[in-house]
Amino acid sequence: MSNGDIGALERAGTATDEELDAQIRESLAASAARGVTTVLDLGDRRYRTLEARALPGLPRVRAAGPPLTVPDGHCHYLGGVVALGVNGVRDQVAEHVVRGVDVLKVMASGDMTTAGTNVFAAQFSEAELAALAAAGHQAGLKVLTHAHALAAVWHAIRAGVDGIEHFGCLTETGPEVSEELLEGAAAAGVTIDMTLGFDLSQMPSPDTMPPGIRAVLERTGLDFPTMYAERVELASRVRAHGIRLVTGTDAGAAHRSGTGGPRSRSRHSWRPATRSRRQWPPRHRSHPSTSTLLA
């Protein structure tokens, strides 16, 4: 749905169905050319990716539909805005279920690319996220969360979600990943994707990167090489706690990679010594465009 160019995800919010369908087909064709057989899409507009499940000669598609978010929250322009409160969350899950999604994606924190959102704060309360996870599980769906903020990561773990994307653990003074947090994630059986699979040489320079990303790096005193090194070190800690770890890039949201779709991510499962209690399906997935996961 987005080719990964800077601003492409936001432009998808105003694209026509025909434009979205063309980009989806282009991404799927590029993935197929690289040997991808299954794609799990974690965020679209007007459920257009669900229509791609019937396209012949292209990878099999599992789709989340529009990601669930709060009013004016991260990716609100994709249409998955939830009326705040437990009942509002349940109503939006029910709509997604009726539309036939294969998985649920929820934006548990703000993001660096959606203006006006707070990457350091949770978007949903713990009670709302728990209700969302329970409703999804009752419908037989896995629930995946976008979580940069430390508060959102804790909410996701305590709510009983199945997977956490990014696992940024950000505070206004930088990332904070305690042993208590990792022990909690291990006990919950959550799968973590730290979105590590990007090419540093293709990352935008400070003068061309989106202002939200630049602001967060400046505020936390980080740069991409330092951040990447710290994230790799954290991945070792995650594995040491027996947490299932997958890795990839944030497809569709400006990071570039040569695997999968035009701007997509190649996912490989990092298998820990101890398997989590909640097993993850071997699928290819993305947020919010298309990419791969090899479990």
Image (cartoon, helix red, strand yellow):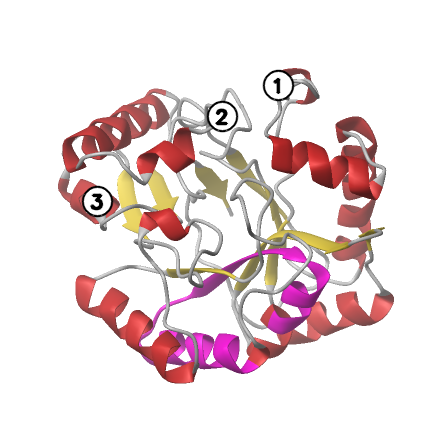
Q: Is residue 201 above or below residue 132?
A: above
Q: Quadrant of residue 123?
A: bottom right
Question: Tag 3: residue type?
Answer: Arg
Q: Which percent across, then down, holds residue 60? A: 26, 42
Give the spatial CA distance, label 1 vs label 2.
9 Å
User: Which secondary structure class fits the magenta region best?
Assistant: helix
Residue 224 vs residue 231, the one in the foreground: 224
Residue 255, by quadrant, is top right
Q: Which residue is mark 2?
A: 6
Q: Position of residue 140 (x, y in %)?
A: 33, 73
Picture coordinates of residue 18, whole percent (x, y): 15, 31
Q: Which residue is mark 1?
A: 208
Q: Is residue 232 left or right of residue 264?
A: right
Whichever of labels 3 and 2 marks the residue nearer the N terminus, that label is 2
Name the element at disc 1. loop
Specify start and end residues of the magenta stretch as a single range.
Answer: 127-155
Tell me, for residue 48, which label it has, or none: 3
Q: Amino acid at mark 1?
A: Thr
